[in-house]
Amino acid sequence: MVAGVAISASARDCWRGLAVVLVLLAAALGALKPAAAQEAATESAKAATVKQIASDLYFFHDFDGSNATFLVTDEGVLVIDTRQHPRAGQDLLDRIRKITDKPIRWVINSHFHGDHTFGNAAFKKEGATFVAHAETARLMQVVQPKEMARRAGYFKSHGYAPNDVKLILPDVTFDKSMTIRLGGREVRLLYLGPGQQDGDTFVLFPHARVLVTPGSFAKHSMPNMAFTTSVENWIKLLDQVAAFDVEAILPGHGDVANRADVKELSAMLSDEYATVKAAIAKGTPLAEAQSTLTFPQYKDWRNYGRLKNEIAALYELIQTGRRGYFE
């Protein structure tokens, strides 16, 4: 009886059923909240951000793209790498402008890849002087069409016009080392020989005990083997870097790392290279090597999914000494 109205048994059963449905629905929605929160947290963790590494040194970290580093002084700003489109470069410049209005004095391109150089135009209009290794300058010209093709998916997904990309070559090149002094700070550019590619430039900030790396290093990530001309020297230079007296290593891809992470990559490269060389020495066909050399110990590394391509690239290098990407 509700307010003097009699309720039949069937009606009561109906109301009970509805109540059960509502309880179950509420429980389901409650269970979704942690999952949704976790997904949001993951997306937030991947969002591009600027991290302050020292009082005057900043690291732009883009999980889904490429990184950049910039030094801020009273005399101006020095930038390492510019992302992979002028609009992405402008976004980086806008982030710098939130920290300082000092002029952009120098831009260093750490290697030839378009995802580190195609933002150059945004900084060229700021009057910056561009610096790169001589081999980087050469390769930027040689592979420009191929680099544009490699970035087509990125351009499309971001709504960026490919025609906006202009080839901005360095104003200054070096062979072994170079020192830039800006605002009382010393910045050392180092070439340790071919790594992931010829021209790979390391940048040392002695005052902060920080080293910025090119494509030769990324933390817990399977490297692209299509460009290296010497895996032996790549391993050697990683061992050199691991011995540097630095507190932080800022890679071109991935998050802030340390010397132990560099040692880990050196060991991984040594393992992969020796294993593939042994397969070739046994006469193992490429297709068989790609299906049997699975390196399960690295299955949780970033970019593990491109392992077959890396094995093919090593077969090309070891068997022919060629690098087809540059032909």
Image (spheres, rainbow, N blue to C red):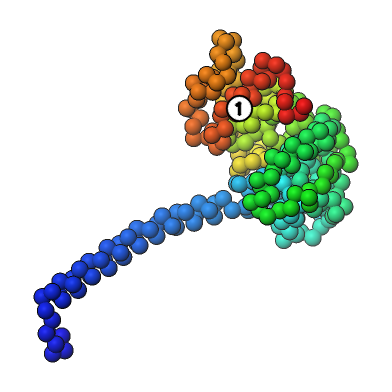
Q: Between 147 and 254, which is closer to the camera in this rendering?
A: 147
Q: Outermost residue, bottom direction?
A: 4
Q: Residue at x 85, y 54 (%)?
A: 125
Residue 47 location (% of width, % of height): 59, 53
Does any portion of residue 48 appear in the rendered image? yes
Q: Which residue is mark 1?
A: 310
Residue 295 location (% of width, % of height): 50, 25
Among the 4 quarters of the image, the one containing residue 258: top right
Residue 108 location (% of width, % of height): 79, 42
- Kind of element beneath mark 1: helix
Position of 269 with respect to 171 (left or right) is: left
Q: Residue at x 67, y 15 (%)?
A: 319
Position of 117 with respect to 231 (left or right) is: right
Among the 4 quarters of the image, the one containing residue 216: top right
Q: Residue at x 70, y 16 (%)?
A: 320
Q: Amino acid at mark 1?
A: Glu
Q: Between 307 and 98, which is closer to the camera in this rendering?
A: 307
